[in-house]
Amino acid sequence: MAGRFDPLNRTAVRGGRTQVPPGPGTGPAAAAAGARRRRWSPGAPLDLGLTLGPLRRGPADPTFRTTPDGSVWRATRTPEGPATLRVSRAADGAIEAEAWGPGADWVLGALPALLGADDDPAAFVPRHRLVHASHRSRPGLRLTRTGLVLESLIPVVLEQKVTSDEAYRSWRRLVRRYGEPAPGPQEMYVMPDARGWAMIPSWGWHQAGVDMKRSSTIVRAARVAARLEEAAAMEPARAAARLEAVPGIGPWTSAETLQRSNGAADALTTGDLHLPGIIGYALTGERDADDERMLELLAPYAGQRHRAARLILLAGRTPPRRAPRMYRSDIARF
């Protein structure tokens, strides 16, 4: 039974399931030269893999890493500059955090929100047996809130109209080539700043496998990055309108972005190729559900539809495949 054993299949990974090694639970590593530290007690069950998993863009994401000691590492660009954050669970259940770089104080200050302190899981009431089982088996699921819009937006734009593998490959190429080495002891990279994204030449996008439509959207967003970052403090409807004012950003992109930057519990992804069919099949056995049917099925979860969709994805109940996989390409080869 998929929901019981929680296999790490592709659907579960899309639900934000990241494997974090159990580790010794001993807190920060000893060799942490120049690190700023913070200790925080979540006061409720917290699963680091489930909470931070949506921030990972593929298994080789240069901005995200898990290590055998049970730590999650994240390289990010804050309003105060680049930073690397390491979080792990201490033996007493508290969260130990270390940070390096000019943005260290910023990421440590934002640590509770990143780990779901602003989330309200008590507001969620399961209405289906499968959702109830998935919810009960994952008490540590919290919705992350990074407070960083451009960082969440750009990888989502890269995922438009292509397979996840293609988008992850483009993200790796762009960050490694145009970003900068992250501060701290891990070999990681911080994505470019807004000006850096806007200055990538046309052949740079092509070499990363990104077509003109997606690259143009990213450049337009980078040019109004300051206005977009204001959306992190807005309520979801206004934030979505702010993002969708940029040509090339629609409801699918804004929802996927706000789920991460704002921790928006009701930001349900519409316009997705697979999600309606997965939700329809999981809840009713219908494999051909569309957006309208998905919205109807998730209506009882109004205010918490994104959380409901994540729990359904994590349950791993998917319709049998009937068609060939989506064609994968790499325009960098042409």
Image (spheres, grey):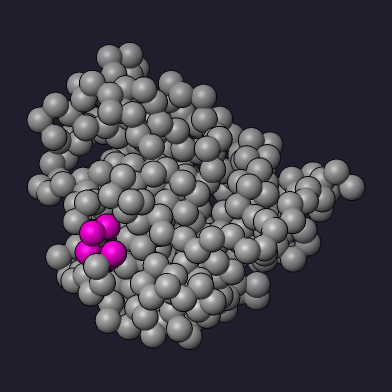
Image: 201 above or below 306: above
Inspect the magenta stretch and tell me whether residue 218 lies in it: no
List the single residue furthest toward the top.
31
Q: Which residue is at 55% across, 66% downward?
A: 274
In the image, taking residue 110 as reference, residue 326 lies left or right, namely right
Magenta residues, dominant SS class: helix
Q: Quadrant of residue 67?
A: top left
Image: 310 above or below 137: below
Q: Which residue is at 33% across, 42% downward?
A: 49
In the image, taking residue 217 as reference, residue 72 lies left or right, namely left
How far from the left and from the top, in percent, is residue 219? 68, 61
Q: Which residue is at 35% across, 56% downward?
A: 315
Image: 66 above or below 220: above
**Along the line of sight, which residue is nearer the eye, 23 or 151?**
23
How far from the left and from the top, in percent, is residue 299? 32, 83
For the question of whether residue 252 can be seen, the reply is no
Q: Which residue is at 14% across, 65% downward?
A: 122
Image: 240 above or below 26: below
List the single residue furthest toward the right.
334
How far from the left and from the top, in percent, is residue 306? 36, 68
How far from the left and from the top, in percent, is residue 129? 24, 68
**Along the line of sight, which residue is nearer the eye, 245 or 207?**
207
Inspect the magenta stretch and tell me whether residue 131 lies in it: yes
In the image, taking residue 221 as reference, residue 118 lies left or right, namely left
**Along the line of sight, which residue is nearer the eye, 310 or 1?**
1
In the image, taking residue 322 as reference, residue 92 lies left or right, namely left
For the question of whether residue 278 can be seen, the reply is yes
Give the tally of numbered discs. 0
Q: Which residues are magenta?
A: 130-135
